Image (cartoon, rainbow, N blue to C red):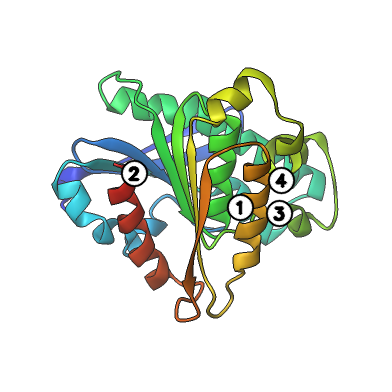
């Protein structure tokens, strides 16, 4: 990827109370925000070949890719602070995405408030589905690849309002009104293999929660030859972005 097509920005987030990085690739097209894996930074998807895998889409001007540091995911896997603090950070991370990252994307698009496609692997899949479900006013679709959606298990069984707000499996059952009506016009793709370290059952549980509220979704089971690895996600992401754009 040419440096001319790659821009890195960093700023202090008062919501997170630390600096975050956002990187973009491409010139024009539908905005796609790709969340990294649990502890990944904004440049992980480039290092792991996801940006190159989307090269034809970028060259065609079909998409612009964006990524942001996995702030809450890093705290989650590194067990930084108390469980309550990490859950607070998870909720604030989504708020940061909605009120800082998405406006930055819109500014980068010349002020055009285009709805964003959210995508990501593993914990990135959770974040992609979560931000779509929380903010269907600015996200149009989510692609969850090899997702882990029942995140409470990473917090030692702790529960708080932050977990409720952040996790779709927590808040979807009680969702109604205009928010739900808008979400029913959105779309979720849940893709998973059945190879090493995969859990397609997690995608089915997420699909059941979405379907129970009438939210369009589907599960794609790629089969036992596809493990929980980057080469799986390099195959998945371009395919679904062609479908959605």
Q: Earlier in the sequence, mark 1 or mark 4?
A: 1
User: Which residue position holds label 3?
Assistant: 151
Identify the residue shown where x is 52% and y is 46%. 217
User: Which residue position holds label 4?
Assistant: 169
Q: For the residue labelled by badge 2, is the local secondary structure a helix, a strand or a loop?
A: helix
Q: Earlier in the sequence, mark 2 or mark 4?
A: 4
What is the distance, in whole Å, between disc 3 and disc 2 at their CAs?
Answer: 27 Å
1 to the left or right of 231: left
Q: Position of residue 86 (x, y in %)?
A: 73, 46
Q: Name the residue nearer the viewer: 236 or 127.
A: 236
User: Which residue position holds label 2?
Assistant: 244
Q: For the residue labelled by badge 3, is the local secondary structure a helix, a strand or a loop?
A: helix
Residue 13 can be seen, yes or no: no
What is the distance, in whole Å, between disc 2 and disc 1 at their CAs?
Answer: 26 Å
Q: Position of residue 192 (x, y in %)?
A: 51, 65
Quadrant in which the C terminus is drawn: top left
Disc ID at residue 73: 1
């Amino acid at each position: 990827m040419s440096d001319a097509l790659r821009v890195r920005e960093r700023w202090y987030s008062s919501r997170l109370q630390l600096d975050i990085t956002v990187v973009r690739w491409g010139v024009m097209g539908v905005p796609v925000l790709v969340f990294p894996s649990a502890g990944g930074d904004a440049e992980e998807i480039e290092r792991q070949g996801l940006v190159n895998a989307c090269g034809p889409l970028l060259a065609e001007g079909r998409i612009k890719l964006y990524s942001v540091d996995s702030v809450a995911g890093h705290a989650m896997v590194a067990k930084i602070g108390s469980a309550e603090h990490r859950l607070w950070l998870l909720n604030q991370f989504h708020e940061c995405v909605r009120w800082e990252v998405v406006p930055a994307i819109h500014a980068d698009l010349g002020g055009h408030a285009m709805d964003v496609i959210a995508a990501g692997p593993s914990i990135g899949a959770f974040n992609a589905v979560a931000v779509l479900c929380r903010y269907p006013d600015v996200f149009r679709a989510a692609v969850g690849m090899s997702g882990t959606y029942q995140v409470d298990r990473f917090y030692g069984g702790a529960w708080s309002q932050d977990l409720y707000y952040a996790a779709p499996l927590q808040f979807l059952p009680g969702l109604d009104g205009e928010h739900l009506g808008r979400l029913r016009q959105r779309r979720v793709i849940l893709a998973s293999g059945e190879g090493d370290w995969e859990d397609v059952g997690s995608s089915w549980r997420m699909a059941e929660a979405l379907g129970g509220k009438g939210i369009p979704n589907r599960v794609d089971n790629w089969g036992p030859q596809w493990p929980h690895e980057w080469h799986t996600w390099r195959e998945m992401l371009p395919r679904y972005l062609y479908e959605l754009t």
